Structures are given as C-alpha cells and as structure tokens.
Amino acid sequence: MASRVIPVDPFDLVIFGGTGDLARRKILPGLFRRFCQGQMTPESQIIGAARAEMDDAGFRQLVADAITEFGPKDANPKDIAAFLTRLGYVAIDAKGDGGWADLKSRMRDGYVRAFYFSVAPALFGDLAQRLHTNDIAQTDSRIVVEKPFGKDLQTARALNATLSEHFREDQIYRIDHYLGKETVQNLMAVRFGNMLFEPLWNAQYIDHIQITVAETVGVGGRGGYYDTSGAMRDMVQNHLMQLLCLIAMEPPAKFDPDAVRDEKLKVIRALDPVLPHHIVRGQYEAIGEQPDYRSAVENPRSRTESFIALKTHISNWRWAGTPFYLRTGKRMRSRTSEIAVVFKETPHSIFGPEAGSHRNALIIRLQPDEGITMDVTIKEPGPGGMRLVDVPLDMTFAEALGPDAQDVPDAYERLIMDVIRGNQTLFMRGDEVEAAWAWTDPIIQGWEARHDVPKTYESGSMGPDDALALMHRDGRKWRDVR
Ligand code: NAD
C-alpha cells in the first residue's frame, strides 16, 4: 500500500530557537524528511533565528550535524546538500531590535509565511509583538507555539491574550505532538469510518478506558524545569487530556478543525472533578548509578510528582458510569503509550464458569510500534474441549503498509505540513487549553493546600502500589505493558 505524498505550497518558515534542542532533534530532521519525500518543494526556505551569532554557513553545518545525529540513518549526502541550500540564518534577540530588518529582507511575497516559536514561552509575547512592529507578519501568516502553554489557567489566559493582540485564533497553531501521531489519527478513522465500533462506544458496552503514557527516562537535564511542573502539568493537562478527548468525544459533523475541537472542548467541560482518593502521586527511587527524583532535581524536599495515576468520569449521557483511568510517569518499566478501551463481559456465558472471564479490548498503541489491536475471544485450538483464549487481531501498520511503513511521518513532520496547509484540526484551540487548565488547577491546588507528599516508587516499576490499588478497589487492573 503506497502512501501518497502531496506537495504543500512553497513556504518561508522561520524557526525562532532554530539552534535549540527541539529544532535540532525534531523540527529540522523532520523537515529534511519531508524535503526528501517531495512534500516540501525546493522553492521553500527555512530560516533559523536565534540568539547565537552565526552565518548561513554555520547554521547549515549545524543542521547537517543534526540530520546525521537525529535524521534518517540512510540519508543521501546529495539530498542533504540540496536541503541545506534551502536554509538561512538570522541572529535575533527576541527582546532586542537587532536582526529584524535582516529577517524582513529575507521574506518573500507570495509564499506561505509561518513562524515557529521554539523558544521559552516567556518570549512568545516579544516575538509576536516584534513580528508586527517590524511588519514581517501578514494577515495570513501562521505562528506555531510549543508547550508548555501556561502553568495554570491564569497564565494560559494571559498567554492567549498576548498572542491574540497580534494574531487571530485561526493563525495560532498550539502544538501537542501527540495529536500528530499516525495512530491518534487512525483512532478517529477507526471510530468514525467504521460501522462496527460506534454503536458500542458508550457506557452500556464499555467497562472502562485506561490511558498509559510511561517513560523509562528520568528527568535528565530538565530537572529544574520539571520540578516546577510535574507529571500533571507536563503530561496530563495536555497529552493525556487530548487522547481522552479523542476517545470520548461525540462524532463531529465533519472532519473540520472547529467541528472536531468543539467536540473535544465539550468532553473537557464534562469531566468530573477528581476526588483526592482517586489520585496517586509518586516520585521515583534511585536505581544503580541513577539518582532518585529529589536528587535529580536537586530539591531534597520536593513535593512534585514524577508519576500520577487517577480516575475520573465524564458526566454526559454517553459515558455516565464508565471510569477513565489515566497514568503517566518517568523511570517506569517500559516506554509505552497506549489507550485501552476495555469492553464489558458478555451478559451470559454459555460456556459456563470454567471458561473464565473474557473481555474484548481495543488497544491503541502510540509507542512503541504504533498500531491498533483488538482482543477477541476464540476457542483454544486443539481437542481439549471448549476452552476460551483471548487473541489480538493485529492492525499494526508496519504489516499493512509493508516497506512504506517507514515512510509514515513523525508527528512533528506531519504537524508542520499541516501548518503550511493551514489545517488546524490537530492543534489545540485557546479555549480547549484553558478548559484543560480549569479542570487541572483545583486538583493541583488541593495538593498544595494539603501539603501532599508523593509516595516513592521503585525505578523500573509501574508506579507506587497505591496505583495498582486504585484499580483493584474497583475490581479492575491495569494492562500489563512491557
Ligand atoms: P533550548 O534551550 O535547547 O533552545 C532554546 C532556543 O531559543 C535556542 O535556539 C536559543 O538560542 C533561543 N533563544 C533563547 N533566548 C532567546 C532570545 N532572547 N531571543 C532569540 N532566541 C532565543 O530549548 P528547546 O528544548 O529547544 O525548547 C524550545 C521550546 O520548545 C520550549 O518552549 C520548550 O518547552 C519546548 N519543547 C521542547 C521539547 C524538547 O524536546 N526539547 C519538547 C516539547 C516542547
């Protein structure tokens, strides 16, 4: 099954923070892949803009090194050389006046204009303002902003207000790279492109839904930032919330940015507040040479969580009575992100109690090996009588797509192409982000008021034992992810 590549309109893309970690690891290697695939046409240009003094040649070398380190292993040197000719660099301080005239002189009329703010959010306002005062942004220019989008409702509102002084909502692309994953979009295709699932997609047939985003790494070099954030702000408020929305939303009338985002917003607004005893927070312990959480963030009294598990409900007709369990953490057993939609048991087992208990489950796996599997119950093969087993029906894309599977774009690549196409469906709208904070804030404020101290958990485990108990109390269990 060959994937089709439709070139996007030629563009001028400015990457503020073009020398930073995100640009080097994701954005620039991703653009290179789109260039090799013919989706980024050779007339397009990419301009790095950052504080470091550097010329075009210096930036091209930086990007060549980034492609070698983070790009495709089989990159053709001719392709790299051709891509580098599309790159330029301007030294700019977001808070100063130098460099802006140079940037303006490089922008071309008649091309899609996009500005990627791959810098600290504290600089978003300065960049937005200077793009205007220097007459670089046009009425159809787009800006792309990275997470974190605020640290609570108040700061998110302030950020939205600042950006909206200079850009309309339809020009602002708030990135949540989870939405750019192939499987996440496939989730929508499976739900809304098949007759099979939607009639069963409600509290009558679905027992519960669990969402797991587990990382094996610790806080690494981001300790200072992470300790002011924690798993709730860093992962739940954005990534897990977005996944929950796509799983739980009503079918939008069409696959159109505002129709989809209106439905997601309704889900967030229908989320119940989370009761304190439905939340488990954790901090990882040391393992081998690796320090424990508090040492890693150099804050021996830190009360920030590196793990969280919680149970919540969506108060609407579709989901009344179906719990949603979310968990995410660092230094966990495996690097796994998945959503499990666990169906109820059949109302009556004709095979008797010895057949055991069996449930269908639809597993949407984001990593590793993006794909979707459906656990179905069948007879165990052989002459041993009527014994039932659960087997996965595998819809792993690698098999369905064959050699083309490796051409499935990374989330960042897809999202940047969507920016150029002017399609906001997979980006968060301002009111969605604010609604997510409005749900998260009271939970965090509750911990702060109670001086809640996270439990410790073994590095390489799946979090504190209390997280298992959160499910066991309800007669359920977390899926065994490896
Ligand atoms: P970084 O510190 O590696 O890079 C920051 C970049 O901003 C550098 O290019 C630097 O020159 C530039 N910069 C700093 N101050 C500037 C100024 N005054 N004027 C102009 N440029 C300035 O940071 P990063 O890890 O690349 O992260 C960039 C943004 O992306 C942050 O908002 C971060 O939260 C977000 N983000 C990063 C990642 C990641 O994996 N690195 C993931 C998600 C979100």
Image (tube, rainbow, N blue to C red):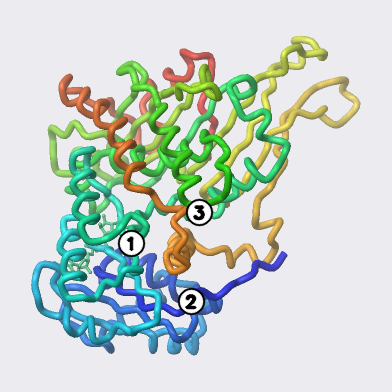
Q: Amino acid at mark 2?
A: Asp
Q: Mark 3 vs mark 1: which is more N-terminal?
A: 1
Quarter of the figure with residue 315: top left
Of badges 3 and 2, nearer the viewer stands: 2
Residue located beneath label 2 in the image: 9
Looking at the image, residue 188 sits to the left or right of residue 303; the answer is right
Instruction: Label 3, secondary structure: give it.
Output: loop
Q: How far apart in space, not on screen, are marks 2 and 1 (Cα)?
A: 17 Å
- Indicate which disc residue 14 carries: none
Residue located beneath label 1 in the image: 144
Residue located beneath label 3 in the image: 181
Q: Where is residue 287 drawn, in percent x and y?
A: 31, 40
Of badges 2 and 1, nearer the viewer stands: 2
Q: How far apart in space, not on screen, are marks 3 and 2 (Cα)?
A: 22 Å
Residue at point 65% right, 57% down? 398
Q: Amino acid at mark 3?
A: Lys
